[in-house]
Image (cartoon, rainbow, N blue to C red):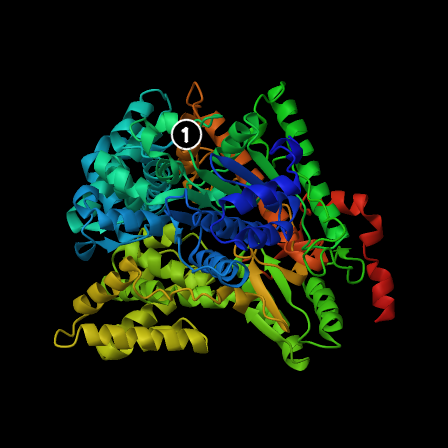
Amino acid sequence: MSDSKFTAPVVQELLDSELSERSPIPSLQEKILAIRNSLRPGQQQMADWQSGPLAISAVPGAGKSTGMAAAAAIAIARQYEPSSSRRQLVVVTFTRSAAANIKAKIRKFLRDDLSLPQTGFFVYTLHGLALNIANRHSDLSGLQLENVILITPTQSHRFIRTAVEQWIVNNPDVYLRLLEGHQFDGEETERLRRQSVLRTEVLPELANTVIHEAKSSGISPELLRQWSKQTTDEYAILSVAAGLYEQYQNLMRSRDFIDYDDMILAALRVLENDSARHIEQNQIFAVFEDEAQDSSPLQTQLLEILASNREYEGMNTDAIHRVSTHSPLNLVRVGDPNQAINSTFTPADPIYFRQFCEECDRIERLATMDRAGRSTRIIIEAANFALKWINNQWLATTKTNNKQQIPDNRQVPFRLQTIRPVEAGDPQANANPAPVGRGLELYTPRDIHHTVELLSQRVIELFGEDPTKNSAAILVRENRQGRWLAEALTPMCKEHKITLYDVGERDRRSHVPQEILALLQFCDRPHSPDYLKAALEALVQRQLIPTQDLNALASLPEEFLYPGPLAAPQPETVQKAARLCRNLLRARLELPLYQLISFLALTLNYDQAELATADKLAERVNQQIAGNSSMGGMLSALSEIVSSERFEPVETEDSEERYTRRGQLTIITMHKAKGLDWDYVFLPFLHENLIPGRFWVPPQSQFLGDFTLSEVARAQIRATLHEESVIPDVGQAWEVAKNLKTSEEYRLLYVAMTRAKLLLWMSAAQKAPFTWSKPDNLQEQAPCPVFPALKRQFPECVMNLAAMSKQV
């Protein structure tokens, strides 16, 4: 719908008159109008909100956080009117850094523009809000925070692994069926290999995926079992998942551990109580949600209950969710479904925000913030073209495959929403700036080394005159690409005095405790297949040994570590891994306990910062085991640090500043770049095998079939949550999973493209690694399908490499 349908045209004199009559402070209405008039049309619609539901669909660079902060400040100011109850506004966003950013902006509007106290509002992350509610009513939530430990379960978490082991013990017949797979000749070595794959990869991955999906949607193990009765697959995947989920829940309860989804569930338990719900709702006049496309069903339910009027408090949550003209929801949700890039590895699903937008559209409560001043026009045109081209290709491919029209356009990768340049007189300084060079530059280098040459040459040109004037970033799809690039670009940056900041390097330091623990557990129990495999994985990750079939090595630890005279000769790659593992065991025998962590850090070839992190870890562990210095004590202390995440560095409020400093070339992943922008953005290595990538089954687990259990389970759960009539079978679910991943990868590319302000540099080399764990193994690689389409659409932006080489 057009924005003009959202509100009736406001005559300025009538608005002035109304505000002057209602405002207790004569100048307050002028200050409110001054803020409102400084905003763009889409932002103004947010500022005009006074009650009811409102959806804001914002394009990248539209200024949604500034608009939300201004609207929040105006809503708080209106609470100073005599008829208002002076309740609080709750603002919710996705990350701590975003919460700090929007809180500072609201305070600035209140202090500098409205001359009001910097009160009347709270800013939370979703989990922070839930924890706050649960803590205030601990008798109802069941959470005694002084007695519980918060964890983030991952596939390698010991609770997940323990749940898997317990499920295997309790379900031997089902486990045997998985072990047999499609076919099995009973050979002992193959049986041991499959056991390793199931116990350390397939089942932990299934458990981790389903626990996140189910808990975030309020699905119990019992309900999951009921759903499994509607499926007919040979492995009973949802039934297996329900059993793993149940074991995990029992472990968590028995040890007084909680995860982030438990916080949301605890807050919802509080709000089931009429008295507690009345108390919470009575403190809040409205809820504003940022990044709404990243909400899960339970998070959305929590916000809707808090945002509903008290007279509706007895209604069920389904009724609350339905938006209508007389909706009880005082809820403003701001987001961009086209920037939803977390749904294939978190429970977030953009379909829920799309539904909210559709419901608000029906009652003319949808506004679109489609004017963006961040980027130069050619970058906007490229992003708009990519969005439409991808949607058209997706629809054409799906029609061909299904022989029919797709009935639900919510399943296409993008919501049809065009980024538009701002209008003349826009308040943003230097909106839609002039491009640097062509604004969009498209390169097809010979290989990844040629890519580095071209990228280096352009960086030197851009930073040449005044390195402190502009900001630049290289956005990569994988951390391994970033590590390789940082090494390749370091000499050039040193020579030209350009600061190179590899964001992934800091992230890798946060894995130091986990890697040290893996090696120490192996040193303590070298004959354990699980511990041997975990140690080998750490060594492969650090590129100390070649990538190889670790399950085959781990299934027979003694034969791998100390092969007898009759054993078959080991390949050189296996010999290298075995030698390194034997060196670790020798160090365990020869070194004192307190030196082990420092030795392992050196063995892992840590850099200076990682060594400092390891030293800090060693000091912490040695303090904890003082008086009980033993390998068991050390492992126990390390396990506690890793599982409770107490050693993780806390994000500071200036983290975004560190990523976007002027005079700095930042290497960062596309995921982490969301919400940030730079003058110059480089997107190298745009190849089809990464974007959109291929949903493939790892060779080691292909004995189960041409699908992965975890992705099938995820697709089946989401189909049920989306109220589809039938749970898809394995084949259909696998296709749905592939489409979900393809859509998300394309949205990730769209996010990456829209980070650039003055220049967007894109390349797809003719030769690149098939996997970046082996960057020297170059092969012919097809470009990301969008890249050739961009070259055809913008031929003037295709760089002539032959001419460039002659100039050099």
Q: How many marks?
A: 1
Residue 235 placement (x, y as % from top left)? 34, 28
In this view, 597 is above or below 49: below
Residue in the foreground of this view, choosing between 671 and 317: 317
Residue 236 in sight from this viewpoint? no
- Seen at 67% across and 81% down, the residue is 495
Asked which secondary structure carries label 1, the reply is helix
- Seen at 13% across and 73% down, the residue is 628
Residue 240 placement (x, y as % from top left)? 30, 33
- Seen at 58% across and 69% down, the residue is 486
Residue 726 placement (x, y as % from top left)? 42, 19
**Is 17 left or right of 445, judged from the image as shown?**
left
Mark 1 is surrounded, within 10 Å at the Cα level, by few (under 14), some (14 to 19) or many (20 or more) other residues, namely some
In this view, 512 is above or below 359: below
Residue 308 in sight from this viewpoint? yes
**Is 653 left or right of 85, judged from the image as shown?**
right
- Give amino acid for label 1: His
Residue 625 placement (x, y as % from top left)? 17, 73
Residue in the foreground of this view, choosing between 161 and 55: 55
Q: In the image as oriented, which residue stretches furthest toward the left?
A: 627
- Seen at 54% across and 29% down, the residue is 358
> Which residue, given by chain and number where applicable, does mark 1 sit on?
321
In this view, 103 is above or below 703: below
